[in-house]
Amino acid sequence: MIGIALLPLVAAEDFGAGPVAALKKEFQLVEQQIKQQGKITPGVYSTVQKLSQMISSIIEPNIEEAHAADQLLLNVVFSEISMCDAKYKKFVNGKLKKGQMAMATVKTEFDHCGGTVEQLKEKYEKCLNERDVLVRHN
């Protein structure tokens, strides 16, 4: 008979392929060790075979089914977030356009200067900078 304590541990990098792959590899190592030593009880061999079959027929399909369900949920949530984002952008853009149209009709004290606020800032930047220097020194 063989002792279970003699089994090597599955390396951490084997888990990168997934828990099912790591479990299969571990069972392959058990089978390999059993074959090398040549002496096993029918009960141990039967247990290893049942566990191997359980992995293939029950555990692996359940993991794949859960993965598919998780992926579907992610797709639905992503779609909802995208729709919400699109509605928000449409709302913001609509409000922005309405605001811009309203501002275009408003007369300000700077209308006689000619140009937008940004153009006026550029035009009078030197004057504003000099004023700021004077204010800081006083």
Image (spheres, rainbow, N blue to C red):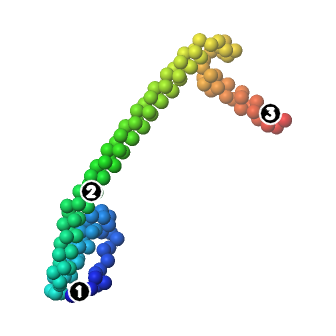
Please, what is the three-letter code of the amino acid marked with disc 1?
Answer: Ile
Q: Position of residue 61 (x, y in %)?
A: 23, 57
Nearer to us of marks 2 and 3 is: 2
Label 3 sits on residue: 135
Say which element carries label 1: loop
Please, what is the three-letter code of the amino acid marked with disc 2?
Answer: Asn
| Number of marks present in the image shown | 3
Label 1 sits on residue: 2
Q: Residue at x 80, y 33 (%)?
A: 135
Could you give the CA–CA distance between mark 1 and mark 2, rounded to whole angstroms?
Answer: 32 Å
Q: Is residue 58 above or below residue 9?
A: above
Q: Position of residue 131 (x, y in %)?
A: 76, 30
Say which element carries label 3: helix
Residue situated in front as seen by the camera: 17 or 98: 17
Q: Are marks 1 and 2 in contact (CB under 8 Å)?
A: no
| Residue 36 visible here | no
Q: Earlier in the sequence, mark 2 or mark 3?
A: 2
- Label 2 packing within 10 angstroms: few (<14), some (14-19), many (20+): few
Label 2 sits on residue: 62
Determine which quarter of the picture holds residue 1: bottom left
Please, what is the three-letter code of the amino acid marked with disc 3?
Answer: Val
Q: Position of residue 89 (x, y in %)?
A: 47, 29
Q: Residue at x 30, y 74 (%)?
A: 10
Determine which quarter of the picture holds residue 52: bottom left
Q: Earlier in the sequence, mark 1 or mark 2?
A: 1
Q: Residue at x 40, y 33 (%)?
A: 83
